[in-house]
Amino acid sequence: MITTPHQKYQQTQLQTASPSQLLLMLYDGAIRFIRLGISAIEEADHQKTNTYLCKSQAVIHELIAALNYDYPIAKNLYQVYEYMIHRLIQSNMKKDKQPANEVLSYLLELRESWDTAAKSLGGTAELAK
């Protein structure tokens, strides 16, 4: 149930976003959760580490769900996303920020690439589905 103006704004933003904007929002969410997970590792807060790294994995699963296998790159992206999930699990289990930092660097690079592609196609291109 939506109770705050901020939640209403977020819902409207999601409902009116283009596919490319939704994809970028997913990347932004995964990046944010990984950064929070890394901070939690540094603070030795195991509960928050688990929460945020699991949330980032869930977002990456959404990226996998958004893949369109009509395009050959989808298979490669699937493998990259699966690798990221594997590394996040390792980071979470060992409470080691290095694997999470690795995934963060990949997500930042992919997000930048998708952003550039969306801008070059006019921002309304259907990148994910």
Image (tube, rainbow, N blue to C red):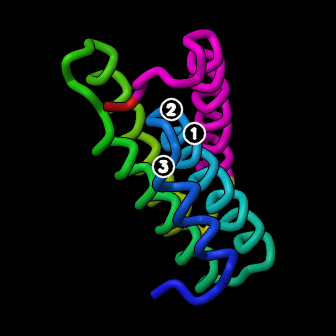
Residue at 46 percent across and 43 percent down: it is 84
Q: Nearer the viewer, mark 2 or mark 3?
A: 2
Q: Is residue 104 visible?
A: yes
In the image, residue 95 sits, relative to residue 81, either above or below, namely below
Residue at 71 percent across and 71 percent down: it is 41
Task: Name the foreground residue: 81 vs 129.
Answer: 129
Quadrant where the image shows the N terminus: bottom left
Residues marked 2 and 3 touching at CB (< 8 Å): no
> Residue 86 colored magenta?
no
Quadrant where the image shows the C terminus: top left
Residues marked 2 and 1 touching at CB (< 8 Å): yes
Would residue 72 appear left or right of 41 to someone viewing this image? left
CA–CA distance between discs 2 and 3?
A: 26 Å
Q: How many marks?
A: 3
Q: Earlier in the sequence, mark 3 or mark 1?
A: 1
CA–CA distance between discs 3 and 1?
A: 21 Å
The residue labelled by disc 2 is 20
Q: In the rendering, at what x and y percent does residue 79 appear?
A: 33, 31
Q: Which residues are magenta?
A: 98-127
Residues marked 3 and 1 touching at CB (< 8 Å): no
The residue labelled by disc 3 is 87
What amino acid is at disc 1?
Answer: Leu
Would residue 70 appear left or right of 95 to someone viewing this image? left
In the image, residue 2 sits, relative to residue 104, either above or below, namely below
